[in-house]
Image: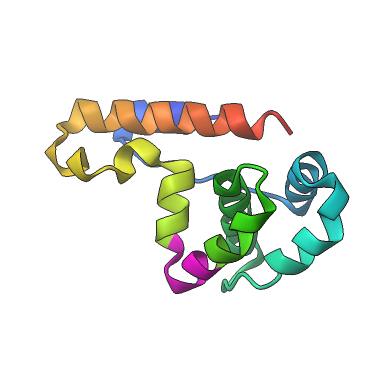
Amino acid sequence: MFEKLKIKMFGDQPTPNITDKILDRIIEKDYSNDFHEIKKKLELIESDSKKGKNRFAAAVLKLADRDLTKIDSLIEVCNNDFRDVIMQAEYPRTYKDDFDDMDEVEEKNAYLDDWTDYLKWLNKY
């Protein structure tokens, strides 16, 4: 709720809080015929916390874009370095190579646009 304000005021990069319920809704909507298979695959994601695991799983599902064949390779990338999956799923504008050339205002705008797009995706569920 306050994430947009934090971006505008401080330039903070927001992080989503993905609950089990949200994750299940994503799987049910995008992979209803393969719900249990997807849940089993997502259990392979490595993280020190449940919150992190759910966040990484949502990122994998977002990047897979309803394509079951992409999930295994995205999980592998995630387990190698979760930032590669998180950045592409949550912060695609700031993931680009030219991010280092952005000034503070451009950086905040990129964060804001990325967060708005992520919420738009997440709110479908």
Magenta stretch: dominant secondary structure? helix
Look at 59% across and 44% down and name the residue there. 62
Tell me the quarter of the image containing the N terminus: top right
12 relative to 1 in the view: left or right: left
Assess whether residue 21 is covered by the magenta stretch. Answer: no
> Where is residue 73 shown, x and y percent of the image?
54, 64
**The C terminus appears in which quarter of the rendering?**
top right
Residue pictured at 53% horizontal, 34% vertical = 118
Residue 89 appears at what percent x and percent y? 49, 45
Quadrant of the rendered image containing residue 123: top right
Q: Is residue 80 magenta?
A: yes
Q: Taking 15 as reference, is 45 above or below it?
A: below
From the viewer's perspective, tell me whether residue 61 is left or right of residue 9: right
Task: Give the x, y percent position of residue 68.
Answer: 69, 53
Q: Which residues are magenta?
A: 76-82
Residue 9, can we see it?
Answer: no
Q: Quadrant of residue 40?
A: bottom right
Q: Is residue 82 visible?
A: yes
Give the color scheme: rainbow, by chain, secondary structure or one colour: rainbow
Front residue (pair 63, 24): 63
Image point 57% across, 74% down: which residue? 48
Above/below status of 51 relative to 97: below
Number of numbered discs present? 0
Image height check: is 56 above or below 76?
A: above
Residue at the spot x=31%, y=35% of the render? 10
